Amino acid sequence: MELVDRLKILTAGARYDASCVSSGSRRKKAGGSMGICHSWTEDGRCVSLLKILQTNDCIYNCRYCVHRTDTDGPRTSLSAREIAELTVNFYRRNYIEGLFLSSAVRGSPAQAMETMLASVKILREEYKFPGYIHLKGIPGVDESLLKKAGYFADRMSVNIELPSAESLKKLAPQKKPADIFNPMHFLEKNRREEKGFLGAGQSTQLIIGASPESDREIISLASYLYGKFSLSRIFYSAYMPTGDPRYIPGVQNPPLLREHRLYQADWLFRFYHFSFDEIIPPGQNDLETELDPKSAWALRNFWFFPVEVNQASYRELLKIPGIGPVSARRIIKARKERTLDFSHLKKLGIIMKRACFFVTCGGRRIPGLPSDPDHIRPFLTMPVSRPRQPRLFAPPGGERF
């Protein structure tokens, strides 16, 4: 099979792994080609990565995976040298700023990890590749392989995939929870103790909709993972039906809206100082579909409002729909110079069509607005059609809620 044909197959197969995020290179983006994904750094820059599989030939038969052993379709792979040369050539043409390398498990977990390790070793040692590298960690491999990989990669991801041990046993019986969590423990321990090891941390992925866990169970797991492993990110990937309903029946379309809401809840964890029970209260199993989780919290806790923007703390400001970390800091800075009114808030970037129901300026509210949750709800309801995964990071000056 020609190189270009293998490249098409392996870049197309890599799109099912969502845990792709960059925080390294600052080179200017230019051009484009197959297999290039776009991501955002924490300061809002857009970066381009070559996102590719080393191979799509797998010994596992995970029911949710398009690369499982009993699916049809061409199987192929690229050698370590081919991956390295493709990456360098794309980089030199200014098409990409880094590499996201994942792989199915061909032969054995150790063999798959060794081949990916060889690819990034050639990149770093022979080609002196300075760009960003995100490397997939294969569950069940020896710690020595993970340690070597951690010095070549900026970030690694060992994907949990399913939110419970029961679902893993049912849909991926060849995988064991310990094979996933032990590498995550090892990577986090070495990242804390050794300079130059995984400078951009580690992430993981959860597949949404292939198994019966509720949003509450998923968010509870996310809270545990952030606390236990200091993850840089958790990625949520809506289950893409593979055309074979034998193992996962009843799913005709990927649950994109649910994925979107979980990303919004994740944002509240990481940047808005919301607790688990604030995002999804006791007794509630799933996030609301009509409202983003921050607006839903505001209506459930309407006693907290209105908040006086000239006096509120940073964390109190973050509770207000329409105000995010950037605009909250702007408010605190601006009110040192003047007493803010509603015209000032709009100039500071606050999303007033949301915030107006929850704030006062100098003790005053905007006249004529509804003042009870039931009447405010229709103004906050978001359209449910064509939901999209939010950006990995907000653009500079932008807000999420």
Image (cartoon, rainbow, N blue to C red):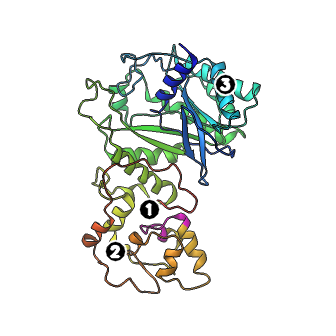
Position above or below: 273 against 357: above
Identify the secondary structure beneath mark 2: helix
Residue type, mark 3 in image? Ala
Query: Around disc 3, counting alpha carbons within 10 Å, would you say few (fewer than 14), some (14 to 19), or many (20 or more)?
Result: many
Q: Position of residue 303 (x, y in %)?
A: 34, 74
Where residue 356 sits, quadrant-wise, is bottom left
Q: Tags 1 and 2 in contact by the CB under 8 Å rule?
A: no
**Is residue 322 part of the magenta span, yes or no?**
yes
Q: Tell me the quarter of the image containing the C terminus.
A: bottom left
Number of the label disc, if any, that sits on residue 84: 3
Q: Which residue is mark 1?
A: 401
Number of other residues with Cα within 10 Å of mark 2, as a class: few under 14, some 14 to 19, many 20 or more: few
Residue bounds of the magenta highlight: 316-326
Say which mark, if any, is on residue 207: none
SS under mark 3: helix
Residue at mark 2: 303
Q: Nearer the viewer, mark 2 or mark 3?
A: 3
> How much space separates mark 2 and mark 3, taking CA atoms?
58 Å
With respect to residue 99, does 45 lie above or below?
A: below
Can residue 230 be seen?
A: no
Q: Residue at the front extreme?
A: 31
Task: Identify the mark nearer the N-term, 1 or 2.
Answer: 2
The residue that appears at 39% across and 61% down in the rendered structure is 294
Please provide percent x and percent y for residue 241. Answer: 32, 31
Counting from the top left corner in percent of width and height, residue 28 is at 67, 46
Q: Amino acid at mark 2?
A: Trp
Residue for point 47% across, 86% down: 362
Determine if residue 93 is in view: yes
Query: Mark 1 packing: few (<14 Cα in 10 Å), some, or many (20+)?
Result: many
